[in-house]
Image (cartoon, rainbow, N blue to C red):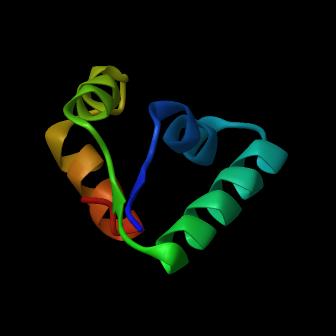
Amino acid sequence: MVTAVDTNVLSALLGGEPEESMQARTALREAARAGGLLISPIVYAELRAAPQGTEEEVAAMLSALRIE
């Protein structure tokens, strides 16, 4: 099963409170075990619109999380 990851999950992981970050990390880990992770073009655009959303930063984050 492939899981589509929402921007809010990635935002919580990167800049949320420690508990939110841990919850996001756990959810992504569990979803990755069940199958692949992906984002939609809209989520990609939202990540790029963030202040730290350079192409290189977003690509590195997606690669590290193994999100297509």
Q: Which residue appears farthest toward the front when viewing the image?
A: 1
Q: Position of residue 17 (x, y in %)?
A: 77, 39
State the residue in front, 2 or 59.
2
Q: Is residue 2 above or below residue 15?
A: below
Which residue shows up at 48% across the image and 72% down it?
32
State the residue in front, 17 or 28.
28
Q: Which residue appears farthest toward the right when viewing the image?
A: 19
Q: Quadrant of residue 42?
A: top left
Q: Is residue 49 above or below residue 5?
A: above
Q: Position of residue 22 (x, y in %)?
A: 75, 57
Which residue shows up at 52% across the image and 79% down it?
33
Would residue 32 be found to the left or right of residue 2 on screen?
right
Q: Which residue appears farthest toward the left when viewing the image?
A: 55
Q: Can you say which quadrant of the picture contains the N terminus?
A: bottom left
State the residue in front, 2 or 15.
2
Q: Quadrant of residue 66?
A: bottom left
Q: Position of residue 68 (x, y in %)?
A: 24, 59
Which residue shows up at 32% across the image and 24% down it?
46
Would residue 64 be found to the left or right of residue 6 on screen?
left
Which residue shows up at 56% across the image and 41% down it?
9
Would residue 55 be found to the left or right of residue 20 on screen?
left
The tally of labels here is: 0
